[in-house]
Amino acid sequence: MSEVIVITSGKGGVGKTTTSANVGTGLAILGKRVVLIDTDIGLRNLDVVMGLENRIVYNLVDVVEGNCRMKQALIKDKRYPNLFLLPSAQTRDKTAVKPGQMVKLVEDLKEEFDYIILDCPAGIEQGFQNAIAGADHALVVTTPEVSAIRDADRIIGLLEAADINAIDLVVNRIRMDMVKRGDMMSLDDVMDILAIDIIGAIPDDEDIVISTNQGEPLVGMGTPAGQAYMDICRRIAGESVPLDNPSMRGGLFFRLSHLLKRA
Amino acid sequence: MILFPVFRKKNSGEIARNRLKLLLVADKADCSPEIMQMIKDDMIRVISRYMDIDSDRIEIQMTKKKQPDCDSFIPMLYANIPIREIPDKGIY
């Protein structure tokens, strides 16, 4: 039984694409057959974060318009043979695809994959409507900021209106040192305000920038963000993993051991 | 810190939380003209059971009212309902 997960946020720049890349890669590490779909038509990014930008021949719009077969457009990941990317089109716009066509595309992919991960564009217009059309589970990405949480609240409302009721929250770029000082909203604050379950919290980690520079998602590596993303993947796969892990505590011991590991 | 409230600076995380809570209430209260008309019709129906009101001159709108204890505003439903007559039989 395959699961279709849309990764969305409303606000731009909070980490949808990074989360899509890491969740997709993490599920592949767990042995699942995974396809990542970049639904941001006109502003293609997921290929770059995955480091697959030089291998694109066909794209999502080509598949929908019947210019190629699905198999021709799917790009196999560099590291994991059970992970594929369906890239977006760069020279078209959101109106090139309709929600009904996305539903059919996703249905076709269900035969071959355990997880279909849709990277949603920012905003609430047609791109968003396309991305959520075939989804049965949503991960809403937010950061502990007023603007991002306000948009997340709106997105949750729109998802519920579209009958997507399996909604989980990913709190990105949290800094436990600032939370402890009282200068950043805590996970409890965010959960309290949005009234949905948190599936994971990603600490603010400079290794994310490094991994994006290199085009290799860092999930599963020994960095705080890599571990937090792996925890999310385990939870998606049905394991029960406690939310409170060492990287979230931000303790001195963890940070020291992390520094030593990198040295 | 609690002993010297003059020197106590409010944590920015708490400020963010309070701003957000009010913001979300205000976002949701900012309802469409259709919803406002439905609220108005329901109010006319309910109040008319108790008094004779001038339903053509009713005004309702969403406003914001400043909280007396702090700088924040809370959303309010403002209704101006002119009464023509209050019947003196039965209900009092």
Image: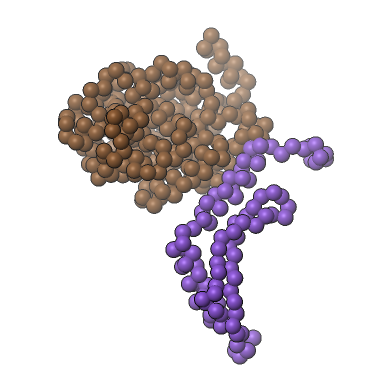
Chain colours: A brown, B purple
Seen in the picture, residue B42 relative to A102 is either above or below; the reply is: below
Seen in the picture, residue A188 relative to A15 is either above or below; the reply is: below
On-image quarter of the N terminus of chain A: top left
**Exactly how many numbered labels are in the figure?**
0
Left or right: residue B30 versus residue A160 is: right
Q: Position of residue A84 (x, y in %)?
A: 28, 26
Regarding residue A32, the answer to whether it shows in the image is no
Foreground pick, A53 / B3: A53
Foreground pick, B92 / A127: A127
Query: In the image as oriented, which residue stretches furthest toward the bottom?
Result: B89
Q: Residue at x 31, y 38 (%)?
A: A94
Q: Residue at x 48, y 72 (%)?
A: B41
Seen in the picture, residue A233 relative to A253 is either above or below; the reply is: below
Foreground pick, B5 / A10: A10
Q: Position of residue A105 (x, y in %)?
A: 23, 38
Q: Position of residue A118 (x, y in %)?
A: 34, 35
Regarding residue A175, the answer to whether it shows in the image is yes
Foreground pick, A222 / A139: A139
Q: Residue at x 63, y 20 (%)?
A: A252
> Which image quarter: residue A214?
top left
Q: Position of residue A67 (x, y in %)?
A: 16, 31
> Which image quarter: residue A72?
top left
Left or right: residue A183 versus residue A157 is: right
